[in-house]
Image (spheres, rainbow, N blue to C red):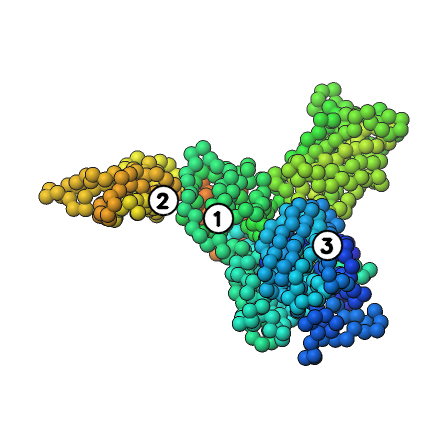
Amino acid sequence: MYQTSKAYRASMKKLIRNKSYLRVNLGVISQEAQKTAYVSDGSFTHYSNLKNPLENVEVTRPYATFEQNYSRVDGSMYFIPRTAQNYYNAGIITKSLSDKYIKISFKTLSLEIKGLTIDFGFSFPIDFTIETNNETVTFTDNDKQKFVTDHAFHGVNYFIFRASKMSGGATRFRIQSILFGIGISLDTDKIMKSSLKSYISPVAESLPTIDFNLTVANYDGEFDIENKDSAINFMEIGQDVQIYHSYTLDDGELEEFQVASIVLKSWDADDTEANFVMVDKFNYMDDRYYKGVYYPNGMSLYNLAEEVLIDAKVSEYWIDPYLKTVTVYNPIPICTHREALQYIANAGRCVLNQNREGKIIIKSSFIPDVSVFSDNVAEFGNVQAILSDESKREYATFEQNFSKTNRTQYFFPRNANYMNTGYVSESFSDANGNFSMNPVIRFTMEAAFTFYSLLLRFGTAYPEAFTIRTYNNGTLNGTHVIAETEQNMIINLDFINVNSLEIEFTKARPHNRVYLEYVEFGDETNYHIMYHPDLYKTPKGRQLEKVKEVQILRSILTYGKNQIELNNEVIQISQSQNSFMFEFGNAVHGLTCGVYEVEPDSSGNSIISSYTASVTESGSYYCVVTFNSPPVNPVNVRLVIYGYEFMVATSTHKFALNSTGKTEKWTNPLISTNVLANDLGEWMSKYYASDRDYELDYRGDPSLDVNDLVFLENKYVDDMQVRIYEHTIDFNGALRGAIKARREVN
């Protein structure tokens, strides 16, 4: 779920929403440059618009002016109005016909900008320069109104555009629109309708998908395939596409965030509309991964995922650091790169997805185990006990206004056989409630996760102030100072992607310790879908077939003992073809090869060839054989590959769920140890324990993601949670959405 502002969340829940906008960028465009650009220098006409060209707003009503070869009498131009408030968007127009320049600066640090896309208007510069704080690039013989360069500008603080020769002669220099990058940008004024459909499997049972269908107006022929100036000429299959949603807040400000980063798959156009189809990046990860290797000493799933992603030539990815602690031994069989990532995600109890910025994401998807530590614990305290909701006891101690005579406290035992007290700090506060050394409790999670509240139940002596710090892999996420306290507290904050949490007690009652009995991490979501105003109709529920049992197959590989022929075939070798790759259906090791004449001798024995070869590269399912001194002209030889097949023993781990129902058999070739099989089985059992599915027709919210957990109003079940596995957002000037979700079982 995208973390929007409170103002956005509140406004989206109103009965009547404010206006939404959609923007689609095709190509590589710097959003930071686009958002922070402003015209900083130059002399411009009074009817110029210095803002719209930077927001890619088209000039649709140009003004007729006294410039050489510029004005037209075909009804396409307008007279300049007498009053400024009635000006149409004319773009940036220099006042002078000579010494023409436009300077655009950025309200941010230096930027990296790959290319520029500029619409100069009817009279465009033939010869001009683009100057930055680092370089000046000269362009000559330009013959296009819509100019595109793929030149990479590094460390840019500003651009100065200077025109020395114009196509129309003595005309002003104009910039009607500019994109800081290569591509086109389509906004709400151009978009007729769109539909974004995302799908994910919460247990990596199938591959994630994103499908985006976009229809834009084409009345001006901008997307006609025969139009040499058509924007379609700048499009390529596989080109990056960014989708942005904007919403008008109640104060009139726009809140914009990225919805998806996907790739262009196909397009077509007629005289009225153009249609585009975009898909997720997994769609193009269909090359085969064949480099799986058996790891006798083990390999972390993190490193294995990196190997697959690097082999797939994917540079933008994020792998959960938790996977560094998960070790596998078995090789990945030959499959596509996306399927290899699917095996890894499932084995690590993760979801496989791509995020809004287009990064491939492998993230843990379970409630992690939590450990707790403090080096400031009284002898009779037990910090580990605060993770359990068992009742706690208190000892009567010599602290100010602490001991009671109502039989709720106990005397200390003569030996160290203490009762369960929960956490008790070793440090005492002074007369002002301050500590010489602040007590600190640290929680460490098995993997990062998100929760939206923290319950703290203190003993008789509770602190007067404390600070909560959250971390993700050692990086400070947030600091929250709590100055108003009570004995039982629910702290409603957004704890996002936390794998370490620290509570530092900074103030207590005078001459007291800190007593903490119980800590509970709250719900994984704070998003509610209500009958009113969110849903157009009541949810459609579906009863799924019950699962009686989940079976996890474990495969244990051991080295084979008998060498066998793995491949025997006649091949043609030459100096131009001296290397060959072979694949095997079963996992193998210890590969060698022999080269023989095609025909055996009269006794049927193989004749060793004069040509030699060796295995130069190999994995568990493939090898590469290279001939050492092949002939100039092609020659047929018989190549035999020898090796050992791994022996495979299997074991099935069974997890009972119901007395009746179907059996779900789960086979992942990476699962070889008891620990992995048990962890996976428990995770899968939690998923299959749910037998209810819901379809929702609702108002739509682009901040929701697949695999999000949300509360769904239900008249029979309080605080019912469902996990989204399919989400559709339609836009035609207004939003509408559809959700498919599975009931979450705790």
For label 3, the SS is: strand
Q: Nearer the viewer, residue 386 or 501?
A: 501
Q: Residue at x 66, y 40 (%)?
A: 472
Picture disc at residue 104: 3
Question: CB under 8 Å between callouts 2 and 3?
Answer: no
The residue at which mark 2 appears reads as 622
Question: CB under 8 Å between callouts 2 and 1?
Answer: no
> Which residue type carries mark 1?
Ala
Label 3 crowding class (10 Å Cα cut-off): few <14, some 14-19, many 20+? some
Q: Residue at x 74, y 67 (%)?
A: 90
> Which residue type carries mark 2?
Tyr
Q: Earlier in the sequence, mark 2 or mark 3?
A: 3
The residue at which mark 1 appears reads as 312
- Above-or-below relation of 314 to 50: above
x, y (%) of residue 631?
A: 24, 43
Q: Residue at x 74, y 75 (%)?
A: 78
Q: Earlier in the sequence, mark 1 or mark 3?
A: 3
> Which residue type carries mark 3?
Ile
x, y (%) of residue 364?
A: 58, 45
Q: Earlier in the sequence, mark 2 or mark 1?
A: 1
Q: Residue at x 72, y 59 (%)?
A: 100
Q: Is residue 195 visible?
A: no
